[in-house]
Image (cartoon, helix red, strand yellow):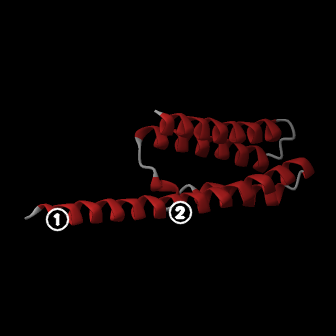
Amino acid sequence: MNKKWQFVVVLSAVVVGFAAVSGQRAQLDSIMREKLVHTQLILETVVTSDWASLEKHTEDLERLTNDPRWMVLRYPESARQSAAFVRALQDLRLAAVKRDLEKTPLAYTEVILKCVECHRYMARARIA
């Protein structure tokens, strides 16, 4: 293969790779927006003690973690971060089921902390 064709093959591979990464980024952005909406709705339900809606939105948010768009970043640390987030959601749902006025806001805070920890980790990982 001459140099011209080698260049075309390499350039094509780069373009295809960039398009795949760009598509993954769009999927991840999409699901993160959905996650943010549910998290905001959960705050509203925690503040108003709307237990049924709190359970629903928490379950919806947990369900998002099984969406293929969530799994775009398949690294061991991403999996650990995601698992910690799911555990925090399960604790929140349990507090909602028990109608626990003291544990519910603490559990919600833990969910938010898990979001922030993951986003902070991902930002550091991109810099490194």
Residue at figure coordinates x 46%, y 37% from the top left = 77
Q: Characterize the local packing of mark 1: few (<14), some (14-19) or many (20 or more) Cα atoms within 10 angstroms.
A: few
Q: Is residue 33 visible?
A: yes
- The label shown at residue 4 is 1
Q: Which residue is mark 2?
A: 27
Check the picture and name the quadrant holding the N terminus: bottom left
In which image quadrant can residue 34 be found?
Answer: bottom right
Mark 1 / mark 2, whichever is N-terminal: 1
In the image, what residue type sits under mark 1?
Answer: Lys
Of 72 and 91, nearer the camera is 72
Is 102 drawn above or below residue 22 in the view shown? Answer: above
Residue at point 92% right, 52% down? 48
> Compared with residue 43, is residue 80 higher up or lower down, i.e. above or below?
above
Q: Is residue 3 left or right of residue 92?
A: left
What SS does tag 1 mark? helix
Decide if residue 64 is on the left or right side of residue 80: right
Sort mark 2 into few (<14), some (14-19) or many (20+) by Cα contacts within 10 Å: some
Location of residue 123 in the rendering, given as x and y in whole percent from the top left corner: 56, 38
Which element type, helix, strand or loop, lies under badge 2?
helix
The CA span between labels 1 and 2 is: 35 Å
Specify the amino acid type for callout 2: Gln
Mark number displayed over residue 70: none
Query: Residue 17 location, x and y as percent?
Result: 35, 60
Query: Taking the image as drawn, is residue 63 in sight?
Result: no
Could you tell whether 16 is left or right of 108 in the image?
left
Kindly identify the residue that appears in the image at 83 percent across and 47 percent down: 99
Which residue is outermost to the left? 1
Q: Nearer the viewer, residue 122 or 38?
A: 122
Which circle, 1 or 2, is nearer the viewer? 1
Q: Residue furthest right?
A: 48
Residue 114 position within the rendered picture, expressed as x and y whole percent measured from the top left: 64, 38
